[in-house]
Amino acid sequence: MNFAGFICDNTGLVLEYTANHVSLVIGVLLLSLALWITTGLLISRHARLAGAVIGLGNVVFCIPSISLFGLFMSVPGLGLGRRTATVVLVLYAMMPLIRSVHAGIRSVDAAVVNAGKGMGMTNLQLLLKIQVPMAWPAVFAGIRVTVVLITGIATMATFIGERNLGRLIHQGITRGDADMIVAGALIVSLIALLLDYLMGRVERIIISPGLRYQSLEPYRGSA
Amino acid sequence: MIHFDQVSKTFAASQRPAVDRITLHVKQGNICVFVGPSGCGKTTILRMINRLVTPDGGTITIDGRSIMQMDPPALRRTIGYVIQQVGLLPHRTIAQNIALVPELLKWPRDKTEKRVLELIEMMGLDPSEVGHKYPHQLSGGQAQRVGVARALAADPPIMLMDEPFAAVDPIVRLRLQDEFLRLQQTVQKTICFVTHDINEAIKLGDYLVVLKEGRLVQTGTPIEILTQPEDDFVLSLLGDDRGVKILDLTRAETLMEPFENRLGPIKSNGHRVQSIDPVKIALEMMMQKNTDEILVCKGTRPVGILRWPAIKTHVNRISGGTV
Ligand SMILES: Nc1ncnc2c1ncn2[C@@H]1O[C@H](COP(=O)(O)OP(=O)(O)OP(=O)(O)O)[C@@H](O)[C@H]1O
Ligand SMILES: [Mg+2]
């Protein structure tokens, strides 16, 4: 096996593909977080709406990615390339993100919300000062799954004209070049691992220590 | 101060009212204790005062103003609330939990910080040790005290306390009750206190409200309820040791034989209690020292003598000879 040799011989190409891959994933991630976390929060107050939206997310998630790319490519204004890739990947992120936000908000101890309300918090204050901070651990679990997922599925966008690491894998398959496949797959995994690690660092900053240790030692005050 | 007029509440999907035409008055600076078995509507009554539950009949007024005319969040910030499940915010430190209402009221930061320190100390905790901890690092008793401190933070004139000492062992509970009474001496709040423990109710209450299935069964001072129970329900709630509880609330001077009509030297065996001490203390002393009489003093001056037959007659008369 000589995938290292392949990378050395094609440094320019590999760097271009990697940069494209990373920028697509990061763009999709930022859009998805803004869109789906907001949606998740908005539907958390309405059980029936939440059921419908989560159901829709599940359906989208079950469609094979290659057909979804193909379908959206034919939508006017999207076409071949980045736009279609972004739309489809954002749709894939819907299920894990909305689900985790919904689960996170629902997992918040009713007694704590009750206390906040009794202290005189408005609904917006309850959301921002209690429900969101307490939902972070569940939301972050969802974000980290999404990051890894998007990085992988992004390889399929090579079929609609994205010049990313998926191309190495695809061409490696058609040419029967194992080094090329391994090089592509390896870099994709490294990107996924790196992004996951970075999210782990962000998580440690955002999630309160009061919640981080909760799984080790149950909160005794609410007995 | 707080007035209930024919207040009722029936929850959706329930045939029986949770609170049924309650009329009562809580006086300024008093501790009013709501007592009754589980499900009798105690929590619902408290939650109607700060509008967490909306009554479907009757009116509640505070200082003559109907609470329905007030903005709920604003109303709640003027009423301290200790919830039954403690409900500290797990993602905030103890200091941040106590600072919650001052923060909502937009107090300046240094004023809030000073108040938080003051409260942690008032609760008998060490600010440097506890302030930066998170709720999961506290014991049950510490968490309950923080819950009380949080309710007191913005110095509200009214406090609603829903079984604030329920989650601790009996010994800690007794200590928290004593601390609570001492605290009330200085803060003088109007307090609505919920418990299903009749001993706690008698010990803490200036005024008791006995509830059963959402209805008001009897109201009065602890001694009134102990000596004149309305019916068998109240009688059974008070327990078989009603006589002893009465002796705990009766002062020695009430049952003593006063000296004022007597001249001549006072014969004493050296055992004495203060005139305002409960008769129960005198009784315990009689048993310990194996004597039938105890000298009753005001300070150092003897004012009367308390004899065992007088106590026996008193208990027999009040409890109808059952003790
Ligand atoms: N939100 C609610 N929805 C429906 N029913 C309720 C609700 N809250 C209370 N109830 C019912 O109202 C009745 C009184 O409840 P409440 O919580 O006031 O009792 P409680 O005296 O505080 O009891 P406990 O000592 O167990 O705390 C109960 O029958 C309860 O099931
Ligand atoms: Mg209750």
Image (tube, helix red, strand yellow):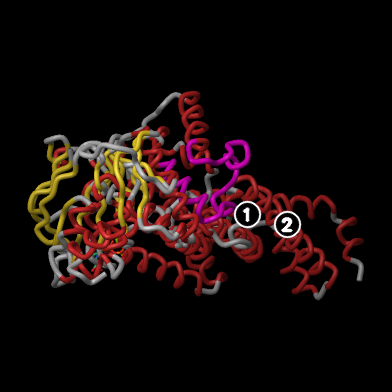
Residue under numbered circle 2:
A191
Image height check: is B284 above or below B236? above
Q: Which residues are magenta?
A: B122-150
Residue lying at 51% horizontally and 56% vertically, measured from the top left: B140
Figure quarter occupied by ligand 2: bottom left
- Dot 1: element: helix
Residue A210 horizontal side relative to residue A58, left or right: right
In the rendered image, which quarter contains the N terminus of chain A?
A: bottom right
Image height check: is B129 above or below B283? above
Between B9 and B39, the one lying in front of the other is B39
Residue lying at 15% horizontally and 35% vertically, measured from the top left: B63
Between B63 and A197, the one lying in front of the other is B63
Query: Chain under label 2?
Result: A
**Sequence order check: which comes first, mark 1 or mark 2?**
1
Residue lying at 71% horizontally and 63% vertically, measured from the top left: A167
The spot of residue B296 in percent (x, y) is 34, 43
- Whether labels 1 and 2 share one chain: yes
Between B209 and A214, the one lying in front of the other is B209
Contact between labelled residues 2 and 1, with CB atoms less than 8 Å apart: yes
Alpha carbon distance from label 1 to label 2:
10 Å
Residue B38 horizontal side relative to residue B82, left or right: left
Query: Chain under label 1?
Result: A
Task: Name the quadrant containing residue B179.
Answer: top left
Mark 1 residue crowding within 10 angstroms, few (<14) / some (14–19) / many (20+): many
The spot of residue A113 in percent (x, y) is 39, 53
Q: Is residue B267 magenta?
A: no
